[in-house]
Image (spheres, helix red, strand yellow):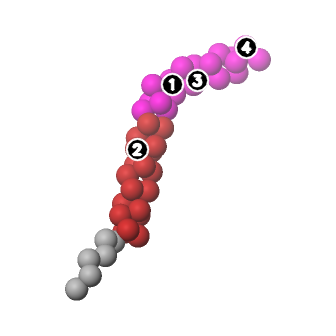
C-alpha cells in the first residue's frame, strides 16, 4: 500500500485558518477604531 498525503484537505484547512486569522484581525481593528470614526462622523454632521 502506498501512502499518499491528503494535500487537498490540508490546503483547505490552511485556507480556513488564514481566513479566521484575517477575520479576527479585522474585528479587532474595527472594535478599536470604530468609536473614533463614529465620533468623527458625528462631529461632521453636527457642524453642517
Q: Earlier in the sequence, mark 1 or mark 2?
A: 2
Quadrant for residue 4, please give it. bottom left
Question: Furthest residue to the front?
Answer: 2
Q: Residues within 10 Å of mark 2 (few under 14, many from 20)?
A: few
For label 3, the residue is 37
- What residue sits 41% from the left and 62% below the top? 11
The CA distance from mark 4 to mark 1 is 22 Å
Q: CB of mark 3 within 8 Å of CB of mark 1?
A: yes
Q: Secondary structure at mark 2?
A: helix
Labelled pair 4, 1 in contact (Cβ < 8 Å): no
Tag in front: 3 or 4 = 3
Residue 7 drawn above or below residue 36? below
Q: Say whether marks 3 and 4 touch (CB < 8 Å).
A: no
Is 19 in front, or is 35? 19
How many angstroms separate mark 3 from mark 4 (CA)? 15 Å
The label nearer to you, 3 versus 1, is 1
- Residue at image mark 4: 47
Q: Is residue 13 above or below residue 45?
A: below
Tag 2 or tag 3, which sits nearer the N-term? 2
Magenta range: 27-48
Q: Secondary structure at mark 3?
A: helix
Label 3 with label 2: CB-CB less than 8 Å: no
Amino acid at each position: 500500500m502506498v501512502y499518499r498525503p491528503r494535500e487537498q484537505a490540508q490546503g483547505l484547512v490552511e485556507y480556513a485558518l488564514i481566513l479566521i486569522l484575517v477575520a479576527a484581525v479585522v474585528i479587532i481593528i474595527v472594535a478599536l477604531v470604530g468609536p473614533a470614526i463614529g465620533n468623527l462622523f458625528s462631529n461632521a454632521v453636527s457642524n453642517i
